[in-house]
């Protein structure tokens, strides 16, 4: 039987702007101020505040507490920079005060579009104390038509960049995408993925580390700049403590511009329409042009246990990839899952860079392996990964050869 998430914490009661002398003995007051960087909230178009209050569940994921989560306040015409809004949260007698409580305020415009968020992080309460915390509203930069959705339409889940993903505790819809921690998945009944037996989300930027996923990795993203030009950049994925991406996909004049007929920006934007979703996985499934590349990776079989895995003498782990584009001047490549792909540190060779990079514009694209974190040669696994080359999704299969043969000392790649 599934244990109800949130438990007695659902007994929280929210009160707004209590009069002096009526403040509770224990609680927290969050003060929502105007936009970061100054300016009035009315000029920014903020018309409504929707409060999010959550506690960690026994499955180590954040779950909203309703009420007070879901409480909305109309602030049309109120300049929060001059007159901040106070929202007070009072615990019930059954609330575990030692548990951290996360609070945020989503800012909406008059059309009901979320355009910003004020976060108050997560803190425990203290018996007999009323804390007051203040935060300015971070204004989302990407709010144009078809903007990314951070609030789920199929439930009360909220998955904003830089903030922990918050499920609604229903066990259905968007709540199934706000996953448990891997530790609780493997040792705690009631923390299974939904549907039961679902494949492990690896690699997925979803706020939780599964298996050998690396934390703090940079992943490619595509978006249009202010002039409507499609560009590619990287976006930081924390993937820990419930926080997935730490930022929006923001591009500027210094980021690589793609050809005018590219579909990558539209695809990436479409994949951001499902709040709390696997963006990279969605992009992976939207390609209509696919190709395969096979690589052979010789490693020195004499490497001793505990020594760093190394190439054969006079060899290297670098290979030019076949050019799949008709262009000889535009060779834009992206490592779809970034450069940290355990046990490999792998990516593109870029002039002047000392480590593999997620993005490249060099013709031809050159794949390079910087390191392999394995205890001995026989422990080095074959590897499969995906690269975006132009408009193609290229599936690369790396087969390990534990021998050094003259004439075949280096990484070699060819079209399959």
Image (tube, rainbow, N blue to C red):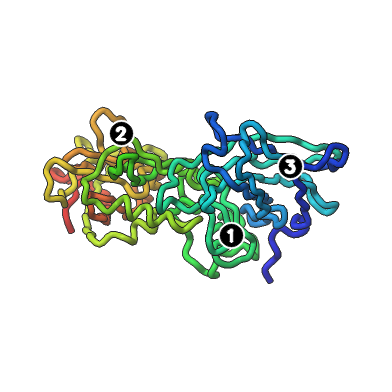
The disc at residue 16 is none
- Residue position for label 2: 253
Q: Is residue 259 left or right of residue 122?
A: left
Q: Residue furthest bottom?
A: 1
Kindly identify which numbered label has been placed on residue 185.
1
Q: Which mark is residue 124?
A: 3
Task: State whether residue 284 is above or below residue 136.
Answer: below
Query: Where residue 376 sits: x, y (%)?
Result: 38, 45
Mark 2 or mark 1, which has the lower sequence index?
1
| Quadrant of the rendering where the N terminus is positioned | bottom right
Nearer-the-camera pick, 224 or 214 = 224
Closest to the observer, 208 or 184: 208
Quick check: 347 left or right of 161? left
> Quadrant of residue 156 in the image?
bottom right
Q: Position of residue 400 (x, y in %)?
A: 28, 51
Determine the secondary structure under disc 2: loop
Q: Quadrant of residue 154?
A: bottom right
């Amino acid at each position: 039987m599934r244990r109800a998430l949130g438990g007695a914490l659902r007994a929280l009661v929210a009160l707004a702007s209590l009069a002096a002398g009526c403040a509770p003995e224990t609680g927290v007051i969050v003060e929502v101020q105007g936009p970061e960087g100054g300016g009035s909230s009315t000029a920014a178009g903020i018309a409504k505040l929707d409060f999010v209050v959550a506690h960690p569940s026994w499955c180590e994921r954040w779950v909203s507490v309703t009420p007070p989560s879901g409480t909305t306040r109309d602030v049309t015409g109120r300049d929060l920079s001059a007159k901040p809004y106070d929202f007070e949260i009072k615990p019930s007698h059954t609330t575990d005060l030692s548990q951290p409580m996360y609070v945020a305020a989503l800012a909406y415009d008059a059309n009901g579009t979320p355009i910003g968020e004020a976060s108050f992080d997560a803190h425990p309460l203290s018996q007999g104390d009323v804390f007051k915390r203040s935060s300015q509203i971070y204004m989302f930069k990407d709010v144009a038509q078809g903007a990314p959705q951070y609030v789920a339409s199929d439930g009360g889940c909220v998955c904003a960049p830089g903030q922990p993903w918050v499920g609604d505790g229903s066990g259905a819809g968007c709540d199934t995408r706000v996953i448990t921690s891997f530790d609780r998945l493997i040792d705690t009944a009631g923390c299974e993925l939904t549907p039961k037996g679902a494949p492990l989300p690896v690699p997925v930027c979803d706020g939780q580390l599964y298996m050998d996923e690396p934390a703090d990795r940079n992943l490619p993203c595509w978006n249009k700049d202010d002039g409507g030009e499609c560009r590619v950049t990287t976006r930081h994925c924390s993937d820990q403590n419930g926080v997935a991406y730490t930022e929006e996909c923001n591009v500027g004049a210094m980021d690589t511009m793609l050809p005018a007929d590219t579909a990558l920006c539209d695809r990436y934007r479409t994949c951001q329409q499902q709040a709390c979703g696997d963006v990279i996985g969605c992009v992976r499934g939207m390609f209509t042009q696919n190709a395969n590349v096979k690589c052979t990776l010789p490693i020195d079989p004499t490497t001793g246990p505990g020594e760093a895995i190394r190439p054969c003498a006079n060899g290297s782990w670098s290979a030019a990839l076949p050019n799949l584009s008709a262009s000889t001047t535009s060779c834009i490549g992206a490592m779809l899952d970034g450069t940290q792909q355990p046990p490999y540190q792998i990516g593109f060779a870029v002039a002047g860079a000392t480590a593999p990079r997620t993005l490249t514009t060099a013709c031809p694209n050159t794949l390079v392996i910087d390191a392999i974190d394995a205890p001995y040669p026989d422990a080095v696994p074959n590897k499969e990964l995906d690269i975006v080359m132009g408009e193609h999704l290229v599936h690369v299969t790396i087969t390990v050869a534990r021998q050094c043969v003259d004439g075949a000392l280096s990484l070699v790649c060819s079209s399959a």
